[in-house]
Structures are given as C-alpha cells and as structure tokens.
Amino acid sequence: MDSQLTVRELRVRWEKALAATRNAVSMHPETYRDLKAQAADIVENTIDINDYFPKMEKLVSRLKTMDPCGHGSIFDIFSARISPSDIWQVKMLRMECQDLLAHLNVFDEWRRNQHHLRMVK
C-alpha cells in the first residue's frame, strides 16, 4: 500500500468501497442480514473449538457471496482478513467480526444519509 496517500485520496477510496458495498447489498439483501447476524453471534457468544472452522467457512462464504468478483467492497476487504489462512489465532476472529460490524454500521448510516425521504400526507 502506498504510504503517501492524501486525505482526499483516502476519502475517494472509502467512497468507492461504500458504493461497491451498496451494490453488493442491493443484490443480496438476505445474505447481508444473515452475515450481520452471524458476525454479531460470533462477537456475543463463545465458540466451541469444534465449531470454529465450520463457522469460519460459512462466514467467508457469505462474504464471498456478497462480492464474488472482488470489487473493493467492505465484504471483499474482510473476506481476505477473515479467511482461515489469514487468521492464525482463534481469538482474532472475534476482533475481526467486531471490526466488520463497525464498518457495516458506518455503511448503514452512510446509506441512510444518502436517501432523503420525506413524509407526504
């Protein structure tokens, strides 16, 4: 990664990631809800060591379903970070899921702010 990025360039990258995430969510809304629920479950509950790899595979599968071609969305970024080959310590999964949920909360807020709906009586 280029260490000489300006704030403007970082904002442009973030906006592109949010737009790619919006496209992915609009194509797979149910998978998006399931992904958020599973990540929250991992954060809030303990995981038996025998369930670790099946849960990881399911989580990574959902992330790849959301962005299978790697368009730079939040799902693409986290599918690489959460993959079993990248997380070599089990305790890191909970931290990565917390980070994923934080990113998705920011995305949800951004998406809500993009829609300017008014109530008409």
Image (cartoon, helix red, strand yellow):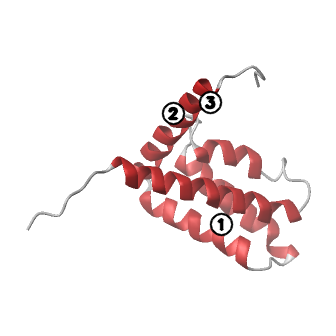
In the picture, residue 72 is in which quadrant?
A: top right
Please state which of residues 3 and 85 is positioned toward the viewer in this rendering: 3
Callout 2 secondary element: helix
Q: Earlier in the sequence, mark 2 or mark 1?
A: 2
Going 8% across and 68% down the picture, which residue do you hit? 121
What residue is shown with label 2? Answer: 16
Going 81% across and 69% down the picture, which residue do you hit? 52
State which quarter of the image contains the N terminus: top right
* Residues tagged 2 and 1 counted as in contact (Cβ below 8 A): no
Going 55% across and 50% down the picture, which residue do you hit? 65
What is the crowding at mark 3: few (fewer than 14 residues within 10 Å), some, or many (at least 20)? few
Residue 98 lies, in percent from the top left, at 71, 62
Residue 56 lies, in percent from the top left, at 74, 62
Q: Nearer the viewer, mark 3 or mark 1?
A: 3
Q: Compared to 15, does 96 lie above or below? A: below
Amino acid under disc 2: Lys
Q: Compared to 16, does 97 lie above or below? A: below
Callout 3 secondary element: helix
Spatial CA distance of label 3 from label 1 is 26 Å
Callout 1 secondary element: helix
What residue is shown with label 1? Answer: 39
Amino acid under disc 3: Leu
Q: Compared to 121, does 105 lie above or below? A: above
What is the crowding at mark 1: few (fewer than 14 residues within 10 Å), some, or many (at least 20)? many
What residue is shown with label 3? Answer: 10
Q: Earlier in the sequence, mark 3 or mark 1?
A: 3
